Amino acid sequence: MPLFERKFDVDVLRNYRDVAVIKALFDRWVLPGEDAGPHGLRVAVRNGYLNFYVKGQSVAKLSIRSGSPRFEVHDKYVAGVVRGHEDESKYAQKYTSFSLDHGTAIPMMDIAKWVHAAETYAGDEKRFVDDLVAVTAGTLDLEMALPARPDARGRVAPRMDLVVAQGQDIGFWEAKCAVNGELRSEHNKPAAPHVVDQLRKYVGWMDHDGGPSEVRSAYSEAARTLLALAEMFGKTGPAIAAWQTFADAGDAASVILPPGVVVGNYCSPRADGVPRSTEMERYLAHANSFLKNEHEARLKRFGIKVLPIDCKPAASCLCILVPGKIAEVEPRP
DNA sequence: GGAAGATCCTCCCCAAACGG
DNA sequence: CCGTTTGGGGAGGATCTTCC
């Protein structure tokens, strides 16, 4: 059995496509390549379940258990507790399950309440990722987590923010906000910025026999699943062609490494509409010092593609990644 | 013994404190 | 002002427990 898989039982879900809560959830689904607005959802295929995100924040997981759909939702969202509410900590790390068993009453589920509550917990980086998805029709996955290899110590799940079909191939992007210190380290010291180590873990995981081919076939299956779901719920848009091109490529697809780093030099608005001018000034200052203090130059010297984004993109902005290597030792000018 | 549930652990993001 | 450190919580795979 492969370590890394992407799959979901679409055929069982088909029997429930007209159930109100299922419809309500998928009504909010907005395919990559289109703006999701304040409360539109993205769908990611995981290993046996789907995850729904609003602005990159997980709203609900949908799995098939004993032949029926089952939701798992954070208690905060079920209760409609928004960020900053005094009861917030009471709900930490707690989840509720809802089953749509045959013959039993459909439990009370207020999807709008879940989504509105979850939106308030989305951080700036997750919002930035959703802005990228809105202009990247080939998006295959968000928050991709790699399973531990059997020989690895500890329970590890390193993550990459975006998985993108670029034509026939798969590219990976790590998104970071300009204010994130992981993009930086003092340029006259040997220690590389943390993000370099993060990318190295990814490349290291892939650098095993079967790694890239497992990832390729997992995402072929994810693309087929997304296409089937899109058809089932009547979704159209540029993602369909992008997914189809990738799915049709099959074994011809390549896994492109290393991942690129996309830097958000702005902060995306929240649904509450509160202006974020003080944060924006902070972002601007960091964007400037990122260049002035050679942090960008350092990442490039390591062989990493760095793509700064200065404001919410209106059109496709992620470039085609090409194969490369991360330098073991930073080449100094 | 296998599947489902519950809990654990690590990675990652974020904000605030800290120190040069 | 700039970069590092620290601690909390979400996400999700890993692992242990329960149950049939």
Image (cartoon, coloured by chain):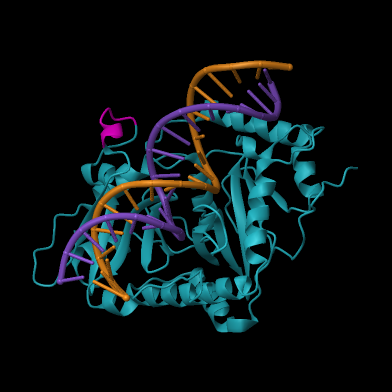
Chain colours: A cyan, B orange, C purple
Q: Position of residue A226 (x, y in %)?
A: 43, 72
Span of residues in magenta:
A84-90
Question: Is residue A82 magenta-colored?
Answer: no
A168, A98: nearer the viewer? A98
Say whether residue A11 is left or right of residue A45: left
- Extreme-right residue of the structure: A333
Vertical comparison of A208 with A156: above or below = below
Looking at the rendering, in which quadrant would you find the C terminus of chain A? top right
Vertical comparison of A213 with A114: above or below = below
A102, A92: nearer the viewer? A92
> In this orientation, does residue A37 appear?
no
Say whether residue A166 is left or right of residue A104: right
A153, A172: nearer the viewer? A153
Vertical comparison of A236 with A191: above or below = below
Q: Position of residue A111 (x, y in %)?
A: 25, 53
Q: Position of residue A229 (x, y in %)?
A: 37, 73
For the point 80% across and 53% down, the residue is A327
Question: Is residue A85 magenta-colored?
Answer: yes
